[in-house]
Amino acid sequence: PDVLLVFGMHLHPGSPRYLMKEGSWETPFGEIEIEEGITEKLADKYSFEIETAQRFTRDNTIELQLPFIKYFFKDVKIVPMGVPPVEESLSVGRDAVKIAKGLGLKVMVLGSTDLTHYGANYGFVSHGAGASAVKWVKNENDKRVIEAMLAMDPGKVIKEALSNDNACCAGAAATAISAAKELGASRAELVTYTTSYDISPADSFVGYAGIVF
């Protein structure tokens, strides 16, 4: 691809959108430039809080993806966006794809979110602790939002996450699905699912899934 649309950030329905319009991000494998042709047009159409190297929100959801992006797609540029879990974010995703196509760019999309954050560390202890809590997160809470993602239903992803706290960046996941559908994606595949409990058992743990559209 020429450009990768990267959606992320821990936001709620009342949050603004965030966009870095220009510059580059440093990774251990070199810098990744921002695709300014897309960011300029997006900023003309939608309101964003504009981030810079000097003024930015501390949030790891986009940052942690960048070394992987640079490693696998050496020359790709990015459009990093923070998108809240609201209906309008889905339009932002679709329009970003349309803008990229209009510029003759080959585009891919990525949405970054964790799943359920369970345990006292996160103030979420509705199903006790230990093995029974892990089973509930895996087989019920995370399963519901994963099923919505696999159904490629961005509205349901947002509704599910806001109702059951099973995706911390639902806007990012939903917007990525919306953008992927604009690119012609018609099916989704669960690559893997795990929790931090599986690696390091503790009363507080987080769910993770990898899904490809």
Image: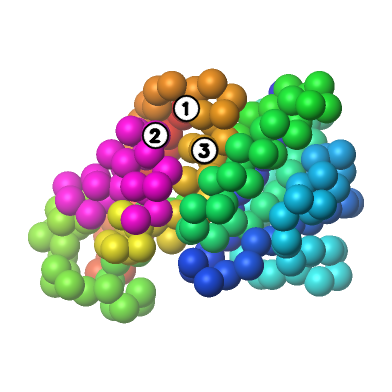
Is 113 positioned to the left or the right of 203 in the image?
right
Query: Which mark is on residue 213?
Result: 1
Measuring 28% from the left and 39% from the top, which residue is drawn there? Answer: 147
Find numbered disc 1 in the image and state the secondary structure of the residue it sits on.
Answer: loop
Residue tagged by mark 3? 178
- Between tags 1 and 2, which lies in front? 2
Is 13 positioned to the left or the right of 121 in the image?
right
The answer to whether residue 186 is magenta is: no
In the image, what residue type sits under mark 2? Answer: Met
Residue tagged by mark 2? 152
Measuring 46% from the left and 29% from the top, which residue is drawn there? Answer: 212
**Gap between marks 1 and 2, in whole Å?**
8 Å
**Magenta part of the chain:** 139-159
The answer to which image quadrant residue 203 occupies is bottom left
| Majority secondary structure in the magenta region | helix
Measuring 31% from the left and 78% from the top, which residue is drawn there? Answer: 123
In the image, what residue type sits under mark 1? Answer: Phe
Name the foreground residue: 72 vs 5.
5
* Residue 110 picture location, percent across and down: 58, 39
The answer to whether residue 152 is magenta is: yes
